[in-house]
Image (cartoon, rainbow, N blue to C red):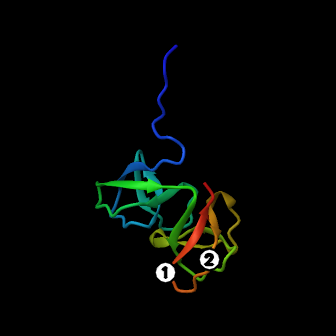
Amino acid sequence: MADYIPIFKPGDDITMTAGAAINAGELCYVSAANTVQKTAAAVEDWLGVATTDAPSGGKVGITSGGVQELAVAAAVVAGDVLISAANGRVTPIASETNYARVVGIALTAQSTTGQKCRVKMAR
């Protein structure tokens, strides 16, 4: 019987190519094959959080799952359901009805745009 070795193991960080400049801590989505960019809006194909800064075409680590710290695009209170937003940030779901875009649940509050809150990631 042939052996199988997984490409990545569950819970492990993965390495992707940056499709544009990315800063550590920004939420990223799959923009092409093995390529990510920071989110520019609410998207279903968000992948995780950049672990390092990367120039366009450079390698970037992506971590997902667990609890991450993400910058907010609007005021967040603990318990808010969050979706991706511009500049690799998150924002409350508000009137959005596409729950496939949910990034996670806010564990802490943050009222200042651009500052971080803790998020229990949805995947």
Count of numbered marks: 2
Q: Quadrant of residue 94?
A: bottom right
Q: Is residue 93 left or right of residue 18?
A: right
**What residue is at 43 percent from the left and 67 percent from the top?**
25
Q: Position of residue 37 (x, y in %)?
A: 41, 59
Quick check: 2 above or below 25? above
Q: Say which element carries label 1.
A: loop
The amino acid beneath tag 2 is Thr
Quick check: 118 above or below 60? below
The amino acid beneath tag 1 is Gln
Between the residue at mark 2 and the residue at mark 1, the CA separation in whole angstroms equals 12 Å
Q: Which residue is mark 1?
A: 115
Q: Quadrant of the C terminus?
A: bottom right
Q: Which residue is mark 2?
A: 108
Q: Residue furthest bottom?
A: 112
Camera-side residue: 118 or 99? 118
